[in-house]
Image (cartoon, grey):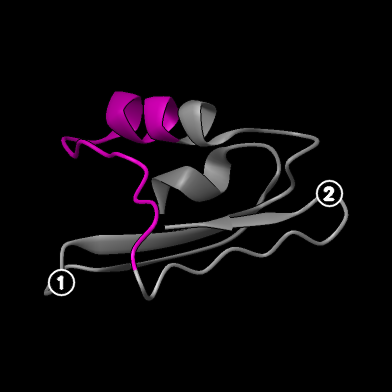
Amino acid sequence: MAVQRVEGVTEASFSYDQAEGFVTFDTTMTSVAAIVAELERLTDFSATERGGGADEHMNHEEGSGTER
């Protein structure tokens, strides 16, 4: 998966059926903007950060984040 090439990304999954991806990354090494930029550079996909939904999941352990 293209986003796993971004330094700091520890896990990534994508559902083509739901057109939705989940990325876990170290916030001290990368950012949502860097992950989105690399995904768009390496693939034909566009990406945006989802936020604020009732099922939104964030993991704020020291140095790590989960974005969807």
Q: Quadrant of residue 62?
A: bottom right
Label 2 CA crowd tier, 10 Å (few <14, some 14–19, many 20+):
few
**What type of secondary structure mainly makes up the magenta span?**
loop
Q: Name the spot of residue 8 as percent of width and height, x first.
A: 71, 43
Q: Circle 2 is placed at which residue position?
A: 63
Give the SS element for disc 1: loop
Q: Amino acid at mark 1?
A: Gln
Q: Residue at x 37, y 43 (%)?
A: 49
5 relative position to 10: left or right: left
User: Nearest the camera: 34 or 59?
Assistant: 59
Q: Which residues are magenta?
A: 36-53
Q: Disc number at residue 18?
A: 1
Q: Disc number at residue 3?
A: none
Task: Give the number of callouts.
Answer: 2
Is the C terminus in the top left, top right, bottom left or bottom right quadrant? bottom left
Q: Name the spot of residue 38 as percent of width and height, x first.
A: 42, 29
Q: Residue at x 58, y 37 (%)?
A: 6
Q: Quadrant of residue 60?
A: bottom right
